[in-house]
Image (tube, rainbow, N blue to C red):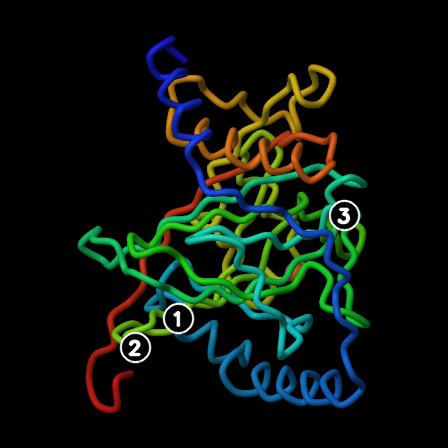
């Protein structure tokens, strides 16, 4: 980063409003919530995500659509901490694992930003385990008016049966506030060295074609992890001033919140939502 950029970065950071990261304890989920979530998932998998329907339709679907899967739990909490910024993992979780920064842009098919898109988010921890007894690593938030979002969380881990493991991913469902676009249910994949071949063994490929367009453009900061690049990901370029500024903002908050860990990796994805057309907005 040039000296001018660095000074501008520091000035912007120092003028940012004070935002504290939270060491929240995720609320427990009730038995009624879990039962309702199971029934809802069964309905989704039988109807909206019926594998036969997917195989027939998938060539016409938005290529970024992906299956919701069985691990969604209704009623997750609001994790927004600032405009377009969300904290999914608590400070305790970030201390135990690797702070990972996802950044997103949501646009229409022409490339114009879609403002205030509401995200539902759920993911496994870095060991590949989902939590159901609480809303750990689950939450919702909204993008800013330019359709951008930043999510502080831990790296989602690989999971699944041997030989058919799923690449680490976050599940996302997004809806625009004006209701002009179809709901986009997707998964953001983090692949080793950004190599999409990590998606080949995915057990979900038996139900739908591999979602290569959902591999995030990921990066690492080796200096934050003993010189070792996370997942052999390329080092974040100092020329990527916009991302460097975001990393600095979050690292400042991590330090202020007593977390000695700094961001070791992250990734960016741009989503394109499909306009509602035809009768009844479908
Ligand atoms: Fe998953």
Taking the image as shown, residue 104 lies to the left or right of residue 108, namely right
From the top left corner, tell me how far across and down residue 134 is, in percent: 77, 69
Query: Element at badge 1?
Result: strand
Q: Quadrant of the C terminus?
A: bottom left
> Which residue is rendered at x = 78% and y = 71% of the image?
132
Taking the image as shown, residue 109 lies to the left or right of residue 151, namely left
Query: Element at badge 3?
Result: helix
Q: Quadrant of the N terminus?
A: top left
Taking the image as shown, residue 74 lies to the left or right of residue 178, namely right
Query: Element at badge 2?
Result: loop
Mark 2 residue crowding within 10 angstroms, few (<14) / some (14–19) / many (20+): few
Mark 1, residue position: 175
> Which residue is rendered at x = 42% and y = 48% of the image?
104
Q: Quadrant of ligand 1?
A: bottom right
Mark 1 residue crowding within 10 angstroms, few (<14) / some (14–19) / many (20+): some
Q: CA distance from mark 2 to mark 1?
A: 7 Å
From the top left corner, tell me how far across and down residue 203 is, in percent: 67, 59
Mark 3, residue position: 93
In which quadrant of the rendered view does residue 32 lie? bottom right
Taking the image as shown, residue 248 lies to the left or right of residue 223, namely left
């Amino acid at each position: 980063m040039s000296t001018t950029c660095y000074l501008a970065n520091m000035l912007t950071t120092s003028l940012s409003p004070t935002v504290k990261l939270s060491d929240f304890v995720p609320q427990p989920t009730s038995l009624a919530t879990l039962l309702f979530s199971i029934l809802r998932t069964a309905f989704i998998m039988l109807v909206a995500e019926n594998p036969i329907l997917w195989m027939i339709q998938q060539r016409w679907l938005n290529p970024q659509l992906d299956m919701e899967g069985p691990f969604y739990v209704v009623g997750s909490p609001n994790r927004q901490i600032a405009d377009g910024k969300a904290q999914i993992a608590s400070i305790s979780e970030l201390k135990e694992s690797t702070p990972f920064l996802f950044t997103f842009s949501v646009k229409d098919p022409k490339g114009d930003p879609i403002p205030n898109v509401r995200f539902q988010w759920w993911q496994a921890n870095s060991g590949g385990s989902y939590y159901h007894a609480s809303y750990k690593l689950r939450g919702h938030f909204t993008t800013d008016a330019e359709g951008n979002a930043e999510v502080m969380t831990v790296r989602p881990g690989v999971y699944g049966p041997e030989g058919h493991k799923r690449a680490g991913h976050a599940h996302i469902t997004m809806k625009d506030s004006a209701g002009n676009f179809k709901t986009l249910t997707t998964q953001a994949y983090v692949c080793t060295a950004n190599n999409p071949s990590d998606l080949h063994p995915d057990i979900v490929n038996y139900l739908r074609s591999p979602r290569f367009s959902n591999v995030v453009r990921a990066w690492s900061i080796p200096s934050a992890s003993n010189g070792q690049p996370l997942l052999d990901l390329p080092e974040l370029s100092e020329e990527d001033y916009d991302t460097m500024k975001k990393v600095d903002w979050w690292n400042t908050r991590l330090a202020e919140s007593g977390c000695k860990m700094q961001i070791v990796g992250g990734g960016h994805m741009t989503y394109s939502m499909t306009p509602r057309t035809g009768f009844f907005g479908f």
